[in-house]
Image (cartoon, rainbow, N blue to C red):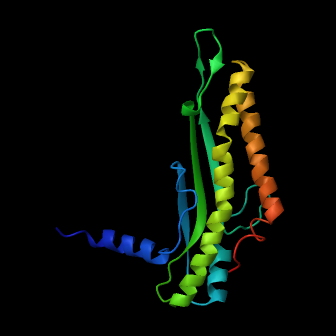
Amino acid sequence: MRLPAIALVGLSVSTAAHAEVSIPFADIPPAAVAYYDVTGTTPAEIRASIDAARPRDPNDRKGVDGLTSWEFNVVWKVDEKGRCVTTLADLNFHATVRVPRLVDGDAPPEMRARFERYLQSLLEHEDGHVRYAWDHRADVAAAINKAGCTGAARAAQRATDAIAAHDIAYDKATDHGATTIVPF
């Protein structure tokens, strides 16, 4: 059986570019990586490509190499006693982590290895955002269950705002990962 050429090209680009990189939040299935492509064969060219393509943090508008966004879709039910309640099963969580992917096939192996070390440390920083939100989803459920029907939406918003505040503090403490990410 012959595979379509496009499938083979897509597979070789993604595996060759990140052969040594593991996703630290792979154990959190509703979290995904979305790449933005960068090119270059020297550190200066690659850094310039990252700087041109990188996203902006919506909180402080700074350009960042990696950006995590997450959300909770919350559903609560009215139980037999007329109370609004939710469980972890009722909280749908999704996270997306945007990071660069070196797509320049002419980059020398030592440059690819350097990029992979940088990318691995960037993913580990972003794991801090994903994992904190994932680990605190029970806070959202508890807030809803405590608030009752009339305050459930506000309680859910306050709980997610607290998680978002942690993300802002985490980035401030690490200067958006500058103190933990291997520089590129």
Residue 22 in percent (x, y) is at 53, 67
Give the answer, above or below, for where 107 lies relative to 121. below
Q: How many marks?
A: 0
Please state the horizontal and vertical placement of residue 145, each as a whole percent of the image.
Answer: 68, 23
Residue 58 drawn above or below residue 73? below
For the view shown, which residue lies furthest in the left direction?
Answer: 1
Name the residue: 57% across, 77% down: 116
In this picture, is 32 found above or below 81? below
Measuring from the top left, give residue 174's x and y in whole percent. Answer: 79, 64
Image side of residue 132 versus residue 94, left or right: right
- From this viewpoint, is residue 73 visible? yes
Which residue lies most toward the top here? Answer: 81
Q: Quadrant of the N terminus?
A: bottom left
Q: Residue at x 75, y 29 (%)?
A: 154
Can you say which quadrant of the picture contains the C terminus? bottom right
Q: Residue at x 73, y 68 (%)?
A: 63
Which of the 4 image quarters holds residue 122? bottom right
Asked if one can make out residue 153 in the rendered structure from this viewpoint, the answer is: no
Front residue (pair 15, 41): 15
Q: Is residue 133 above or below residue 100?
A: above
Image position of 107 (left or right of 171): left
Image point 71% across, 78% down: which residue? 183
Q: Position of residue 171 (x, y in %)?
A: 78, 60
Left or right of 150? Residue 15 is left
